[in-house]
Amino acid sequence: MNDMRIVERDVKTNEVKIAAKDVQVYYGTNHAIKDVSVDIEDKTVTAFIGPSGCGKSTFLRCINRMNDTIDVCRVEGDIRIDGDDIYDAKVDPVQLRAKVGMVFQKPNPFPKSIYDNVAYGPRIHGLAKNKADLDDIVEQSLRRGAIWNEVKDRLHAPGTGLSGGQQQRLCIARAVATEPEVLLMDEPCSALDPIATAQVEELIDELRKNYSVVIVTHSMQQAARVSQKTAFFHLGNLVEFGETGQIFTNPVDPRTESYITGRIG
Amino acid sequence: MTDASMDPAARPAKSGLTVTDARTRKRNAAEKRFRAYGMAAIGLGLLFLLFLFGSILKSGLPAFTHTIVSVEFTMSQADVDDAESKMLKTKAYENFFIAALQSQLEASALDVAFDAKAIERIVGKTGGTIRSHFKDNPGDIGKPVAFELAASSRVDGYFNGRVTRETLVDSRFLQLTDLDLVDALKEAGIIQSAFNWNFITGKDSGVDNPGGAGLGASVIGSFFMMLVVLFLSLPIGVAASIYLEEFAPKNRFTDLIEVNISNLAAVPSIVFGILGLAVFIQFAGLPQSAPLVGGLVLTLMTLPTIIISTRASLAAVPPSIRDAALGVGASKMQSVFHHVLPLAMPGILTGTIIGLAQALGETAPLLLIGMVGFVAREYPEGFIAGFTDANSAMPAQIYTWASRADPGFYEKAWGGIIILLLFLITMNTIAVILRRRFERRW
């Protein structure tokens, strides 16, 4: 992981897509996220790393308001996407989630056909005018999910019949089918074998051209391989945020150093 | 626990893997014993089941056959006019029947002496049946007509072994000498056993006529009741469960509702019966003994069952499916109706059918709202009347038969149980098939 690529990586600064300021999250009385402020750039892969229970997944789920489904969860502070406060009373979380797609830890295709899995989002958002349009969207999404060649002959086979890696790429294709601007990935490779992981990582790098990608990962190697920016979370605090190369080679905070060298976590 | 108390020093110093030590032997023996208990329990259960089915079939099957006396004779117009001019008209008709019987016996070269009373004991009063037949079908006058008349329940009993020469005590219902006549009639082929369609399609009869009793009308009553139960409890139950499981906030109030639903499932059914009597009949003024009221009462009883099983199957749908749907921007309702509900469907259907089967076999609440067996004297006239006309239901009809004095009704009750069980087995089979069909794996 400590290879020279990281240092030499070309880092361009893009415009800010998601701006979080002083975000607090409480689960009942438990203060899970404390004063997190972070600016996530467009067309960039941002990795959240940190030990288990540090709040990185919780923070990720704040970005598309998936935490709304948990009764005891309370979010304070300010998260803006393109300048709009997503916790504003006028924002409909359903609309937000179409704009901020999400891929989960465990591949979770619907128990329907591959085609229906991808077509579901566009259907409920009315993105396709007719059947041919929908076919187009499905093909485009599956191509972007880097799975088209493997499934093009069996689009009407059940999505649950695919292998784990294929299922995860199908879920990515399903997420991009609704034309999101941000793609959130919650440990997308933790249930996959190394080969499938490599394919998904390659895909993430591809996706960077069109989306702002935020990925939560347990694997520091993965963060180093796929991301341009890295945020290190520890016990609900955002300890350090910066260029991936800099975080891994020259961390400022001693806790970051301890974590990436394996002394904590 | 005993492992912890063992002193490590007490262990044997060394032993080979091929030698089983005392502790392992003891554990293996305990496991073997436990398996034996399990097998014994299952064996005992199967034995009871076998015994149950055996006794039901043995006692119930005779209800499906009855003994009929078939006699063919011709009455000319003059005969009819003659009979109609008599003071005792039906008696005159009956005399024709007896004469015809006599001549058929003689034709078979069998000579038994009998009188009109004996015939009455065997087939009941026949004159009325014959007279009304010719009244309804005047075209049959002057033509040979084959009359098939059901024999009395004692003769039925003699045919299927319930009544024997040894056990028969002379009474006004049947005498020992009558059995000689029955034997002779049997030899002549005039009296014989036949499948009793009337038992399946007929209506309830009077207390002294078990031969004419049928379950048909109360099957119809049960059917209309189940319609009410299905169309009320399925939508109400499923809607309530979806709301409670997916949308309702988790607070004290919903906790209270939840606990009460679970408790309602354990409330004795007779409580629902008296509630139905007070609310639906006395307060709301709905007709007494109506399948509509029975259905409403059974709906109250079935709702908790459906709600509990529906909530269980909704909760069994993996949360990842909900996340997936919300993640692509489906609303809560879309995620429930497009993804969660279809996956929970097999469980919901199974729960509903089992709830219906439970309701189908429920007796106590029906007795309280007046759906007792003897009410099932007529078929309802039309669909709406099916809900509002007084009727009984299968289990209530069986209960009524079982409490009647005539031993003929005893076998009718068992026979009714066979039909009821057939319905229940069919419903449970449907539940299993639906579950298999709709089950999806993920």
Image (cartoon, coloured by chain):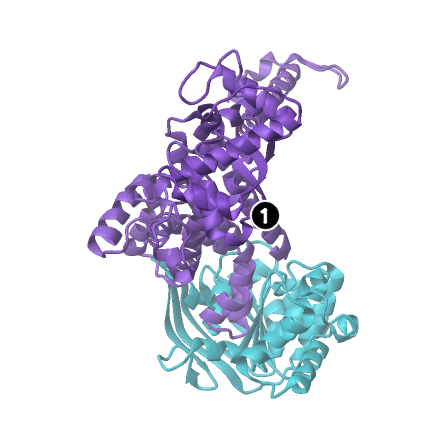
Chain colours: A cyan, B purple
Q: Residue furthest left?
A: B283
Instruction: Report the residue at 68% width, 65% height from top.
Output: A159
Q: Amino acid at mark 1?
A: Lys
- Given residues A131 and B94, the one toward you in this image is B94
* Location of mark 1 (residue): B143
Q: Is residue B389 above or below residue B129?
A: below
Crowding around mark 1 (Cα neighbors within 10 Å: few <14, some 14 to 19, many 20+) is few
- Given residues A117 and A13, the one toward you in this image is A117
Residue B227 sits in which quadrant? bottom left
The chain to which mark 1 is attached is: B
Q: In the rendered view of the protein, which quadrant contains the C terminus of chain B?
A: bottom right
- Residue A80 falls left or right of residue B272: right
- Residue B285 falls left or right of residue B234: left
Q: Is residue B116 visible?
A: yes
Residue B57 sits in which quadrant? top right
Q: Is residue B294 above or below residue B115?
A: below
Instruction: Report the residue at 39% width, 45% height from top.
Output: B376
Q: Position of residue A123 (x, y in %)?
A: 58, 79
- Given residues A191 and B56, the one toward you in this image is B56
Q: Is residue B219 visible?
A: no
Q: Position of residue B375 (x, y in %)?
A: 35, 44
Instruction: Report the residue at 68% width, 79% height from top.
Output: A138
Q: Secondary structure at mark 1?
A: loop
Q: Position of residue A21 (x, y in %)?
A: 41, 76
Looking at the rendered structure, the number of numbered marks drawn on it comes to 1
Q: Position of residue B91 (x, y in %)?
A: 42, 35
